[in-house]
Image (cartoon, rainbow, N blue to C red):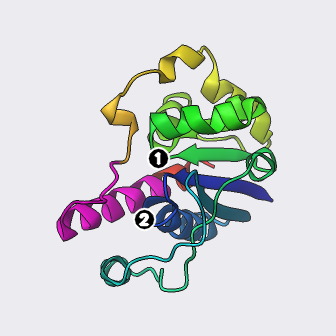
Amino acid sequence: MLKVAVICKANLYRSPAARIFLADAFGQAGIEAVVVSGGILPEGNTVPPAYVSIAAEAGIDLSEHVSHHITTEDLERQDLVLTMTRELLREVVVLAPTIWPKAFTMREFLRRASAIGPRKPTEQLDHWFAAIGRDRKRTQVLGDFDPDDVADPVGGTAEDYRVMLRQVERLSTDLASLF
């Protein structure tokens, strides 16, 4: 069974939505997967009611979600770690350096996996991930590279939240189709 963690900063907006969309996309593709989410900020926060309503418009229920602070152990247990930004990727790799070969921004993973093609039915995950990460250098995640980031809608408009949700849903569907 595939184990995936999706990471954002507070674990209140992007990663909980991605967890739901990605789990649904894997299920629809017939892939057995457990998808969890977490953040790098302290845990125990709930999703503000305005965002719960916006998420409900997109067909997801975040009303019971409570933020989770990701730990080294959480990260090391996963087959794949997907972050929302390059900054977060750097943070989780510093927290758990051994995850580098299986840690990507969501967009980076999709871009690289699309370039090498879908996983072959008999191909082991670690071999496919190695192919996806071939020639990848840690220095490539320095700085900001907007095309690899899913923008944080905090402080934005309701439409910013909707745009982020549509983006994460599309990324999830496209990503699952490659497995």
Quadrant of the image for the N terminus?
Answer: bottom right
Q: Is residue 75 above or below residue 170?
A: above
Identity of the residue drawn at 31% across and 34% down:
146
Q: Nearer the viewer, residue 120 or 159?
A: 159
Residue 73 vertical placement versus 95 (above, below): below
User: Which residue sits at x=66%, y=41%?
Assistant: 119
Q: Which residue is mark 2?
A: 13
Indicate whether 25 appears above or below 111: below
Residue 59 picture location, percent across and down: 40, 81
- How many neighbours does mark 1 have within 10 angstroms: few (below 14), some (14-19), or many (20 or more)? many
Left or right relative to 129: residue 44: left
SS at mark 1 in the image: loop
Q: Is residue 89 visible?
A: yes
Q: Is residue 146 magenta?
A: no
Residue at the spot x=53%, y=15% of the render?
139
Locate residue 156 relative to residue 92 in the image: left or right. Answer: left
Residue underneath mark 1: 84
Q: Nearer the viewer, residue 153 or 128?
A: 153
Q: Mark 2: few, some, or many residues within 10 Å (few <14, many ≥20)? A: many
The stretch of residues the image draws in magenta is 151-173
Residue kind at label 1, given as amino acid type = Met
Q: Main secondary structure of the magenta part?
A: helix
- Identify the element where label 2 is drawn: loop
Q: Give the vertical position of 151 relative to 61 (above or below).
A: above
Residue 108 horizontal/vertical position (percent): 48, 35
- Spot occupied by residue 174 in the image (x, y as percentages of width and height): 46, 52
- The span from disc 1 to disc 2 (Cα, nearest Å) is 11 Å
